[in-house]
Image: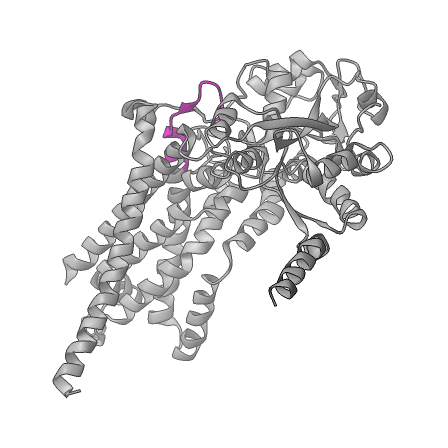
Amino acid sequence: MFRIIAAFLWGMLICAPAYAAPQEIMINGSTTVLPVIQKVGEAFMNANPEIVLAISGGGSGNGLKALGEGLCQVAMSSRGIKESERTDAAARGIKPYRITIAMDALVPVVHPDNPVNKLSVEQLREIYAGKISNWKDLGGNDERIVIISRDSSSGTFETWEEIIMNKGRVTPRALLQTSCGAVVQAVSKNENAIGYIGFGYLNDSLKAVDVNGVHASAETALDGSWPISRELYLFTDGEPEGGLKKLVDFILDPLKGQKYVQEIGYIPLKK
Amino acid sequence: MSTANKERLIQIILAVVAFSSLLFLGLITLFLFMEGLPVFRHVGIGAFFTGTDWYPSADPPEFQILPLIVGSLAVTLVASLIAVPLGVLTAAWMTEVAPPLLRRILKPVIELLAALPSVVVGFFGMIVVAPILQNVFDADIGLNLFNAGVMLAFMSVPTICSISEDALYGVPQSLREASLALGATRWETTAGVVIPAAFSGIGTACMLGMSRSIGETMVVLMVAGGAGIIPEWIFDPVRPMPAAIAAEIAEASFRGAHYHALFAIGMVLFLFTLAFNCVAQAISMKKN
């Protein structure tokens, strides 16, 4: 009798991997990175049916917070981790580990009817600091500049602040929009507006402005000459292992994940 | 069970239900203050209320909410200037002039306006009203104080109109008859007798409408523009308190300074709506 039970248990033990529930990986964070992971995630789950990805957006800060609280295994972020976030995570024994997965470029945009075609980083800084407030100082019409910015808690805003503002503050007169889509909407409806968006959001209702004499295009972004670009990251708790490692390798594979990065409108990593 | 016991049991159940909402209100208030007050470890009370720099994610951050308070009060003021005359005059027309059949149709329709989801009102403001303000009124930007005020007026008219109408309807017919018998015209009767007689009800209606405007979130998040400045004129963008909380709470780190600051804004907002409701209560008590 015991022998039968023992044999049965032994059998279960051997068969266990076959019956194991699929591994679930929770991914949370930046809405900028989200479309890439969604697209790559579908292909990844088709190739690896034993792994299920649960992907949700909510912002870089949210994702890093969730990672630090152990609520997700992967955080998507469009910025580096802050020291305060690292210490919060460390308090729970979590060590955030950064993986670069793609490049994103921010583009200043104006209404197509605006005669201004090029600006320097310094001019952009002065516009956003509120020091230049009329388009005629930039070779445009005699109209007040309507400054449109992303919300100060977004990763896009932080990147803009880091690259353009150089520790200066964005004027409180700037209109803060809660998504890149809302910036597109506001700029395309206002001849005197200026805003900034991710490369993937450019369309015919807007005009991209040349920065420091460089024209915004996939080529300039790829060869690194475009001045306003940033890396997009995933964060995991320590170096990824097992299913997580499979996922990360898949995303970084030039023929798999990186192909989708390009499709979404971001810039794949150079190999 | 005897009838007396059954009666007592029902009384107890009703008392528990009645007090539970009081208990929940108390607990929520307690929570709000517990999470909000710690912000004063990071910023002085004076600077918090009178400073004009709201840079919650700068390094070091600045938590000064005067522009947000002024933004909230400004949109509420604009909304009231539009909604109060509109609401009260509609109510007066319905009780004093309109034939009873029309009144019976019109009242539910106006109340239905209150059922319009606020996100739909916000969307309307963004897509329809904003371009009109830019093109026709030559505003720098259509997402501004005026747009938010108009959209909020939209949402508070049903409250103001419906409660005022009840108050006007409750004015005894004998008062109107006496006034008319003394030779007053219908307009004189309405303006000089009926409206003053229903004043407490109308006052309550206006206060409740304003309290709805100041607490409304989605509309101001979508159409107020979101710039943290003290508005200088009616087409300036503003960032009312509820919009700031809604836009930022998701990114504020749990129990960090920014998180406490947002709860403190919630606290201030709560005190404002409480004040409006107390005034409404006081007005309605005074008459009784």
Residue at 32% x, 40% y: name it. B267
Residue A52 colored magenta?
Answer: no
Q: Is residue B153 visible?
A: yes
Residue at 77% x, 42% y: name it. A40
Q: Is residue A192 above or below residue B165?
A: above
| Nearer the observer, A145 or B244 | B244
Res. B67 image quadrant: top left
Q: Residue furthest bottom?
A: B2
Q: Is residue A128 above or below residue B275?
A: above
Q: Is residue B139 visible?
A: no
Q: Is residue B216 left or right of residue A41?
A: left
Residue at 41% x, 38% y: name it. B241
Query: Residue A226, image x and y in percent?
Result: 77, 18
Q: Looking at the rendering, in which quadrant would you find the N terminus of chain A? A: bottom right
Query: Residue A76, image x and y in percent?
Result: 64, 35
Q: Which residues are magenta?
A: B57-71
Res. A135 image quadrant: top right
Query: Residue A176, image x and y in percent?
Result: 55, 32
| Nearer the observer, A246 or A27 | A246
| Nearer the observer, B182 or B248 | B248
Give the number of callouts.
0
Query: Residue B160, image x and y in percent?
Result: 36, 58
Residue B64 colored magenta?
Answer: yes
Q: Looking at the rendering, in which quadrant would you find the C terminus of chain A? A: top right
Picture colour scheme? one colour
Q: Is residue B193 above or below residue B150?
A: below
